[in-house]
Amino acid sequence: MIAHRSFSVDLDKLTSDVSTTILIRQGLVVDHQQAQQADILIKDGKIADVAPVISAFPADTQVIDASGLYVMPGGIDVHTHFNIDVGIARSSDDFYTGTRAAACGGTTSVVDHMGFGPKGCNLHHQLAVYKKYAKENAVIDYSFHGVIQHINEEILSEMASMVEEEGISSFKLYLTYGYKLDDESVLRALIQLKKVNALTTVHPENDAAIAMRREMLLEQGKTAPKYHAESRPLECEAEAIARMINLAKLAGDAPLYIVHLSNGLGLDYVRLARRNNQPVWAETCPQYLLLDDSCYERDDALKFILSPPLRPQEERDKLWQGLIDGSIDTVATDHCSFTYYDQKQRGKDNFSACPNGMPGVENRMPMLFSEGVMSKRISPSRFVELTSYLPAKLFGLYPQKGCLAKGADADLVLFDPEQQVTTTHDLLHDNTDYTPYEGMNCHGWPIMTLSRGRVVACNGEFTGRAGNGRFIRRKPFEHQK
């Protein structure tokens, strides 16, 4: 149960009228640099002022008493998969239910990884498809990563217009799955994406090793869900990370972003590259920080089939150290939800037939706040850096997003550090039928989320509207020192 905090405001006005002037008073205001007691004034959906005390404001200003609360930039989740068709199933969350869940968890922007389109399609094809998916449905602001299915001269020449005209300044390529790229294609993509000021993001797993191990296990009759993890050991991921780092070096230090890092060996390769001043960044996800491979021994192990799979406890500890020492840059979710009682059951007799992915877009902010900030592993400012500031900087959203500067969008989340909530799926707002974090306790909880000055969630209730989210044209990538 989420405890109700009374706010003496006209909530109807705050949920519908972006022009309403709002004063958030005397919260602990946190950005990526500092935490201070302060007021925040919002006008026309933008941050107008941040000061220790703001005394001059219009008479009809809606005043939100934030005493005792953390007030932070809204979360930016740069790794979601809404409405994705993976061939054997379509994810259960579309851009309405997915962004609704995100908003209720304190996230105010997403950058979605688009799914594959028809064989041979160009880069603009899936962008048009996904814009249509999101336009009338998203409740918070959104953008997309380009998706690269193949490389030829037409695709390479198209990259510039995606960046300059469409505002798509990052692209995803895969080293596994149906549209995996070989090393030559990867190298050509890296060279061209650097040239057009785009960031290459990669799903790094060694496809050949995985395919061999999977076939071996299936031939031995080892088909239970736990063998999914055995088919994709951490070395398959770490090898592909090292290979991508070396290819990026060969591409003239092309900027590289590793998605959903799940193990310490891969993190060591990232650290080594960075010691050599190579522009490489790493993302991890809550599931790799909070869950481990013991989940595959459970009766409901199908819930935890995702790629990369969950790792042993010692790998979790290594990732937490990466958050603490700064060698991991962002925490995103890889939210890709399939229903347990229907879609996931495809894999009950054969792990390889189970759609890969888990929900988590609503859990990211509260779980990391609880296990990171309230457990004193990381500071509140480091929390903001991981969940909002660095995602905004890396993916061309800053300073419109990810900060509390004057003129920035009034995307904010208010956390109550005293709230203690036991996570259950009936508290959440996605469109699947389970949460992998069922029964986990959260110390601290987001009790209000504002998207461009509109309250889209309050006290665990969704108050936003489909279609209020806007597509964000992102700026070209700039190397962040």
Image: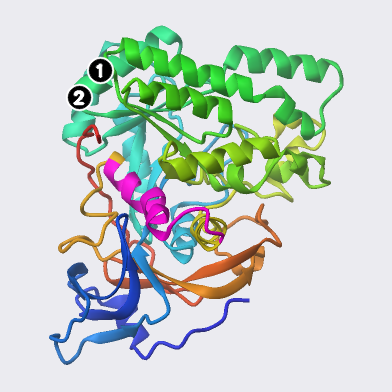
User: Residue beneath label 1, please?
Assistant: 192
Query: Judging from the image, what secondary structure is the residue with disc 1 in?
Result: helix
Q: Is residue 382 magenta?
A: yes
Residue 417, compared with residue 282, is above or below; it is below
User: Residue beneath label 2, please?
Assistant: 196
Query: Judging from the image, what secondary structure is the residue with disc 2 in?
Result: loop
Dot 2 and dot 1 residues touching (CB under 8 Å): yes
Can you give x and y, in whole percent of width and height, for residue 100 in the image?
46, 62
Residue at image position (78%, 14%) is 216
Residue at image position (32%, 50%) is 389
Residue 78 appears in view: yes
- Of residues 430 and 226, the one drawn nearer to the viewer in this rendering: 226
Residue 218, compared with residue 407, is above or below; it is above
Picture quadrant where residue 177 is located? top right
Can you give x and y, in whole percent of width and height, for residue 128 in the image?
31, 39
Q: Amino acid at mark 2?
A: Val
Residue 79 appears in view: no
- Of residues 419 and 150, the one drawn nearer to the viewer in this rendering: 419
The quarter in which the N terminus is drawn is bottom right
